[in-house]
Image (spheres, rainbow, N blue to C red):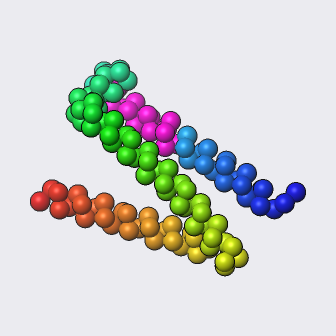
Amino acid sequence: MFYGWYIVGACCLISFYFSGCIFLGFTAAFEPIANEFGWSYTEVSFLSKAYFGRRNLATIVGFVSGVMMVGGVVGTTLTGWVFDNMGRYQPAWFLLAGESGLATILFFVYFKNRSS
């Protein structure tokens, strides 16, 4: 079997794993909140809607889903291009680490400026 199919299979498994952690595992953060205040998941969802508003919550979820879709398309295409031109994945991992570091810095700068 062509070696690339093993890479595709591994990427699918990793994607399934992380999708489960992010989309399904994120609800685990609500468990301590719900238990602390004696709320149900319905009440936690209602509070999210009440805080952001129905229209804004739908906009936020739609925007985040769109960004994730674009990131998935661009990221996999860019990683494939890097491998095709350089013969290895290491530069793509460095790019990912750099982007993650930049996002972390921007996150903390935003909240530091917001609190002052």
- Magenta stretch bounds: 21-35
Q: Is residue 26 above or below residue 40?
A: below
**Does 63 appear in magenta?**
no
Instruction: Please state which of residues 71 and 101 is positioned toward the viewer in this rendering.
Output: 71
Using the rendered view, name the quadrant where residue 80 is placed: bottom right
Q: Residue at x 88, y 57 (%)?
A: 1
88 lies left or right of 71: right
Q: Would residue 36 be visible to someone looking at this image?
A: no
Residue at image coords 66%, 77%: 85
* Relative image position of residue 113 (x, y in whole percent): 17, 62
- Name the residue furthest bottom: 86
Vertical placement of residue 7 versus 26, above or below: below
Pinpoint residue 31: horizontal percent, then vertical percent: 40, 30
Question: To which quarter of the image does residue 48 belong?
Answer: top left
Along the viewing direction, whichever of 84 and 106 lies nearer the viewer: 84
Q: Is residue 66 above or below residue 30?
A: below
**Residue name at image x 37 percent, y 40 percent:** 61
Q: Position of residue 18 (x, y in %)?
A: 56, 47
Q: Quadrant of the C terminus?
A: bottom left
Looking at the image, residue 30 sits to the left or right of residue 79; the answer is left
User: Which secondary structure class fits the magenta region best?
Assistant: helix
Q: Is residue 26 magenta?
A: yes
Please tell me how many numbered marks the rendered image carries: 0
| Residue 27, position as x, y percentages in the image | 43, 34
> Which residue is farthest right?
1
Residue shown at 70%/76% (left/top)? 87
